[in-house]
Image (cartoon, helix red, strand yellow):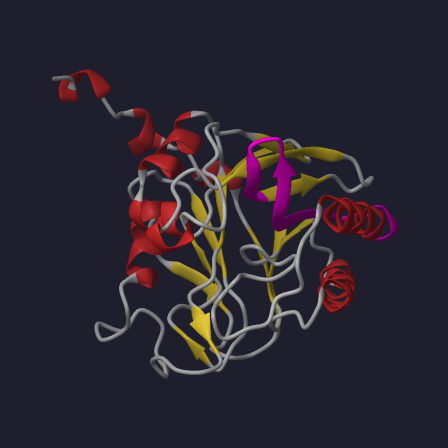
Amino acid sequence: MKIALASPPFPKSIEDGLYQIEKLVKQAKQQNAEIICFPESYLPGYPAEEFTVEKSTPENMQAALDKVCAIAAANAIAIIIPMDWFIADGILNVAFVISQTGEVLGYQTKNQLDPTEDNTWIPGTERNIFEVNSVKLGITICHEGFRYPESVRWAAINDAKIVFHPQCTASNKNGPQLSEWGSKDNPYYEKAMMMRAMENTIYFASVNYAMRFQESATSLIAPDGKCVVYQTYGEEGIIVADIDTSIASGLLAKRFKPGLYRN
């Protein structure tokens, strides 16, 4: 499978976010990608203090989802689009999976919220496996992928060849100025990406915003823990790469023996 990982700028509005999505989807299709993933909460934008984020409503989120479905169908490419989603109990942080024909295949919720997010979203309670072009995939969202490795192991045990990781570890205001991927002096995030791949023997695709100060790069990690490709820090655009699903065996994940850890 050929995948694309998008590093867009922070959206100025929902309309601007949809513009960026369509632009990067077209670039991915030109390079024959079969699926493209965007960063965490891209519609309407991650609610960081430094940004003014357009208020999401059930109506504008449904309209935005409909537009992304139309973009997927028009370009014949699957899209993973993270966004706010309203249910009776509150607002979920989700990542929708849309097929190349524009069909909504479902969504993955962020189940392990960062403590700072408790007043923004409610936690989800389920995990899901999706299938695109005969390749099974999982999704884990930001904090839970970095700090709750069980979320990735679950997907690997359930035959996911790749886990997509929409996230936001970036700022246009302040933070480290990174120059070397995986450097010992970098924040731990890129090391965590490596571990999620190699401890499960699957691909791990982490997708960040393009900002001036990034604590991690948009990156594709192979099942042996090596970085296949990453987007230059602060640079908008996409990276496209082939994944060899035959080497994403899930071997180490499937050797896990949960019975050894019962109280």
Q: Residue 150 vs residue 55: left or right?
A: left
In which quadrant of the rendered view does residue 131 lie? top right
56 vs 163: above or below: below
In which quadrant of the rendered view does residue 216 lie? bottom left
Q: Nearer the viewer, residue 159 or 46?
A: 46
Q: How many numbered circles are shown?
A: 0
Q: Say if residue 1 shows up in the picture.
A: no
> Quadrant of the image for the N terminus?
top right
Boundaries of the magenta span: 73-94
Q: Say if residue 230 shows up in the picture.
A: yes
Q: Position of residue 173 (x, y in %)?
A: 45, 83
Q: Position of residue 220 (x, y in %)?
A: 47, 57
Query: At 35% across and 57% down in the image, what residue appears?
Result: 226
Query: At 52% across and 62% down in the image, what residue appears?
Result: 47
Query: At 78% across and 67% down in the image, what residue appears?
Result: 19
Q: Nearer the viewer, residue 260 or 109?
A: 109
155 vs 96: above or below: above
214 vs 111: above or below: below
> Quadrant of the image for the C terminus?
top left
